[in-house]
């Protein structure tokens, strides 16, 4: 086929006047503060307020470098899971299995066999096993959902149960302590005064941001989540892309498993229980649309930090974890209500 | 509520006086007057954006007017919410039929005002009354227990109408009721409308199709820019030209572009041989040459759209081949078709074509953003430049690449879709209902656009429910009936009646 360009010529007529008026009156752009920027500002404000509350109620105990590092380390594991979750949700899906998969990955990478091999060769074996377990679980989800036509909620629920069960079988319900010292030396170290796992969280966040906002993969994610039928008819391979998204969620579960091992020095089938819910909450509070088509990595990171800081402030003030859970529930509902308010405003 | 014979009182059932509705930043209604008499079909005409939808929503209680008065039976009323509207006897049938697919016919009709004693539903009574209403509408064959999801669009419309009657509606607002129907079903709709008006019910009828208004309407009110620009026009005494002049503020002769004769040696860009899709159509052969517009005419459900979608790979053909510019396409692969240079503008722009909350430029580059990328990293500047070029050359309004697709009018959304394939450099364009939901002024623009695309070397295959439109746009026409091509020939040598005849014959066979 020739490279000849098609050039339409349109005669402008008086109807353009009508059309122009029509659109001029109907608006179309929204107030910038109700847009993504406004949401980010809102989240930063919420975080600042939390910090002020923390300082006022707990003083130096809260506002210390030590405590800051504690908060960041706590945020890191959930944070990495949430980055993967942001991709899945933006692509119009949901992944309930990431917590279980994290648990399975910590167990699998700390079995006697794996650790022996790591002792003999290199600690990287542990990392490799964790990442592989996570990614494979994610891809199984992806194949079931994208090609098998299983509803995402059910497929990942099955993975949640199945991966937890497999982890229990492998670990025989015992905690497997990490004995590979070089692994612990590497991941429990500080670089420039900041723990390695915090650096990992930062790195994954930046990579996630670039992937979502600056690459064709990210654009496809928005298209697949925003209108899968339109994406398909525009020539995008929607199924394959959805499968990749679950693969990414699995991969982040694997990364989070490595970080979990570094923090707790043990693999256990109970690792990561209910983390999927915390991740989903952080993603949604951050401003990613649960319906898909709109996602924000910056929002997700802020969402994670808000939840972790909240927990920290409460703990500093000796408030029970039960009360913390109630407050988190209220925050989730408030965030979703706000999001819907913004969404409906930008549509009228 | 007064319930004497509506024919005996000459006064209007419903009056709207000086209705103004201001939205933040927009004056959607700017002084609308409307009188509806009992037993009449009152047609409401106007281009997209003229304020019809807002007016309907004011009547339905979904919007509160900023200024103005509404009188029912001469009494001033406030329609605070949809329930109040129904209480006053005003029922609205929206274009997107608001029935619940999973419920039965009777459950849908009594949705929101279930017949119940102490919380227990009276199913037998509901069934009996439903049968009564359906009989009144001339559709006793619909069973009250049937699941609504299994009914056709026409059947759902009857259910929607029955629901209006279950509220003792005296004014029924119908928003483009014929848009989802084929011509036989439209005839049936008209019969029902006649029966309702004979019983004194007033119908406010909204349609883009002037021919329909001729058939069914009594009086016409024309809206433009949120104002009533003409009212009390008798359908029988008003010419099409006059109406178009009122709607557009100018007179138009019918605006199909004249097509230059096709070069005899023009390259065959699209070649379809023996294409079939089980249960939809079979044995479809067609060629489209560079510079040619070929139309597919036929009723809704005849297989027209399925043919386009199968050529495009969105459905997997059960037999046959599609060749584009000498390249044979794999079955069921949209990506392959797009790569070979076919573009489809689908029937449902909003649900199949656009990312409504994304900016226009990203919609235009939806199938080409990868091409502007440097090793997977997007180049939004280049993308935007390519999109802006299309916005200019298609005269897409407003010329704002960052506006969300949702806020564009139907005609401009269609242009954005065309722009998507032009950026791609597609030379085979499949257009499914290119002017659905596009107002009259913008229609002529789409016609001119398609014609000039063909003139610059594109092969265009177009499907439309409006036979006049298919004939006007195309060089050559294929008439489809029951999944088969029943006629093929130059568009100039066939008229609307012959096409209808062919279509009916095919159906009877």
Image: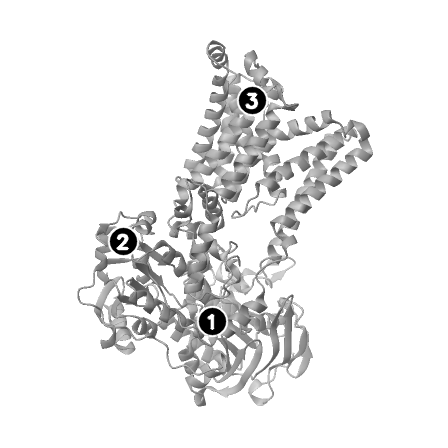
Residues at discs 2 and 3 both on one chain: no
Residue B499's quadrant in the figure?
A: bottom left
The C terminus of chain A, quarter of image: bottom right
The N terminus of chain A, quarter of image: bottom left
How would you rate the neighbour count of disc 1 (Cα within 10 Å): few for under 14, some for 14-19, many for 20 or more?
some
- The residue shown at (57%, 28%) is A200
Classify mark 3: helix, strand or loop. Answer: loop
The numbered disc on residue A9 is none
- The residue shown at (59%, 85%) is B12
Report how far apart the C-alphas of labels 1 and 2 lie in the structure.
32 Å
How would you rate the neighbour count of disc 3 (Cα within 10 Å): few for under 14, some for 14-19, many for 20 or more?
many
Classify mark 1: helix, strand or loop. Answer: loop
Q: Chain of mark 3?
A: A
Q: Which residue is mark 3?
A: A269
Q: Which residue is mark 1?
A: B176
Q: Indicate whether B206 appears above or below A299.
A: below
Relative to B70, is A130 on the left or the right? left
* Closer to viewer: mark 1 or mark 2: 1
Q: Which residue is mark 2?
A: B278
Q: Indicate whether A49 appears above or below B66.
A: above
Give x and y (percent) for residue B39.
52, 83
Report how far apart the C-alphas of labels 2 and 3 lie in the structure.
51 Å
Classify mark 2: helix, strand or loop. Answer: loop
Q: Chain of mark 2?
A: B
Relative to B342, is A146 on the left or the right? right
Report how far apart the C-alphas of labels 1 and 3 lie in the structure.
59 Å
User: Toward the viewer: B243 or B219?
Assistant: B243
């Amino acid at each position: 086929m020739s490279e000849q360009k098609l050039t339409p010529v349109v005669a402008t007529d008086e109807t353009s006047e009508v059309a122009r008026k029509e659109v001029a009156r109907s608006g179309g752009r929204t107030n910038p503060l109700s847009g993504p920027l406004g949401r980010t500002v809102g989240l930063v404000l919420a975080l600042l307020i939390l910090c002020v509350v923390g300082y006022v109620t707990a003083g130096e105990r809260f506002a210390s470098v030590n405590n800051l590092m504690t908060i960041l380390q706590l945020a890191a594991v959930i944070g990495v899971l949430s980055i993967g979750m942001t991709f899945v949700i933006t692509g119009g899906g949901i992944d309930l299995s990431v917590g279980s998969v994290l648990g399975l990955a910590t167990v699998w990478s700390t079995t006697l066999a794996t650790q022996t091999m790591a002792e003999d060769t290199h600690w990287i074996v542990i990392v490799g096993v964790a990442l592989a377990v996570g990614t494979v679980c994610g891809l199984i989800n992806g194949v079931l959902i994208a090609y098998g036509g299983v509803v995402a909620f059910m497929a990942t629920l099955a993975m949640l149960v199945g991966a937890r069960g497999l982890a229990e079988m492998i670990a025989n319900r015992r905690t497997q302590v990490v004995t590979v010292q070089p692994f612990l030396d590497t991941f429990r170290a500080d670089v420039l005064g900041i723990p390695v796992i915090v650096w990992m969280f930062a790195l994954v966040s930046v990579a996630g941001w670039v992937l979502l906002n600056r690459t064709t993969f990210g654009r496809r994610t928005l298209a697949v989540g925003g209108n899968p039928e339109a994406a398909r008819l525009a020539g995008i391979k929607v199924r394959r892309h959805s499968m990749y998204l679950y693969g990414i969620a699995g991969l982040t579960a694997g990364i989070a498993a490595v970080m979990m091992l570094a923090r707790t020095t043990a693999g256990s089938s109970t690792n990561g229980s209910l983390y999927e819910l915390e991740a989903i909450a952080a993603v949604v509070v951050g401003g990613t649309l649960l319906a898909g088509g709109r996602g924000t990595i910056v929002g997700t990171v802020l969402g994670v930090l808000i939840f972790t800081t909240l927990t920290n402030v409460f703990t500093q003030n000796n408030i029970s974890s039960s009360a913390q859970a109630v407050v988190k529930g209220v925050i989730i509902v408030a965030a979703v209500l706000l999001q819907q308010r913004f969404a409906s405003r930008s549509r009228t | 509520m007064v319930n004497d014979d509506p024919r005996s009182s000459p006064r209007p059932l419903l009056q709207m006086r000086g209705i103004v509705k201001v939205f933040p930043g927009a004056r959607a209604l700017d002084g609308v007057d409307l009188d509806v008499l009992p037993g009449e079909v009152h047609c409401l005409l106007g281009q997209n954006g003229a304020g019809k939808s807002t007016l309907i929503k004011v009547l339905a209680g979904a919007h509160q007017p900023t200024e103005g008065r509404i009188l029912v039976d001469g009494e001033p009323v406030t329609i605070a919410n949809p329930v109040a509207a129904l209480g006053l006897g005003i029922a609205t049938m929206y274009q997107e039929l608001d029935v619940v697919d999973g419920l039965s016919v009777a459950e849908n009709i009594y949705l929101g005002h279930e017949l119940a004693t102490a919380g227990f539903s009276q199913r037998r009574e509901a069934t009996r009354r439903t049968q009564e209403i359906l009989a009144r509408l001339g559709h006793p064959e619909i069973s009250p227990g049937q699941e609504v999801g299994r009914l056709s669009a026409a059947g759902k419309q009857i259910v929607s109408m029955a629901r209006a009657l279950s509220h003792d509606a005296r004014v029924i607002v119908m928003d483009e009721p014929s848009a989802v129907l084929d011509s036989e079903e439209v005839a049936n709709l008209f019969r029902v409308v006649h029966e309702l008006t004979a019983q004194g019910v007033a119908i406010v009828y909204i349609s883009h199709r002037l021919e329909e208004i001729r058939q069914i309407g009594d009086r016409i009110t024309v809206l433009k820019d949120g104002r009533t620009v003409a009212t009390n026009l008798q359908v029988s005494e008003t010419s099409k030209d006059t109406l178009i002049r009122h709607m557009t503020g100018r007179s138009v002769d019918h605006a199909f572009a004249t097509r230059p004769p096709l070069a005899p040696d023009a390259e065959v860009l699209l070649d379809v041989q023996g294409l079939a899709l089980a249960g939809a159509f079979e044995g479809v052969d067609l060629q489209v040459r560079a510079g040619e517009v070929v139309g597919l005419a036929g009723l809704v459900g005849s297989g027209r759209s399925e043919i386009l979608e199968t050529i495009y790979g969105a459905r997997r053909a059960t037999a046959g081949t599609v060749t584009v510019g000498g390249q044979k396409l794999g079955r069921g692969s949209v990506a392959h078709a797009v790569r070979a240079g076919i573009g489809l503008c689908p029937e449902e722009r909003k649900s199949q074509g656009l990312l409504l909350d994304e900016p226009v430029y990203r919609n235009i580059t939806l199938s080409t953003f990868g091409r502007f990328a440097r090793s997977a990293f997007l180049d939004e500047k280049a993308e935007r430049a390519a999109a802006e070029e299309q916005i200019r050359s298609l005269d897409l309004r407003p010329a704002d690449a960052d506006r969300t697709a949702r806020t564009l009018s139907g005609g401009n959304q269609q242009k954005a879709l065309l722009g998507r394939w032009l950026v791609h450099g597609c030379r085979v364009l499949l257009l499914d209902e290119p002017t659905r939901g596009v107002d009259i002024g913008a229609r002529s623009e789409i016609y001119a656009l398609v014609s000039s695309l063909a003139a610059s070397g594109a092969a265009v295959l177009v499907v439309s429910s409006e036979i006049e439109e298919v004939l006007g746009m195309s060089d050559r026409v294929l008439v489809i009936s029951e999944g088969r091509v029943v006629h093929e020939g130059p568009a100039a040598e066939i008229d609307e009646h012959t096409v209808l005849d062919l279509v009916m014959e095919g159906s009877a066979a």
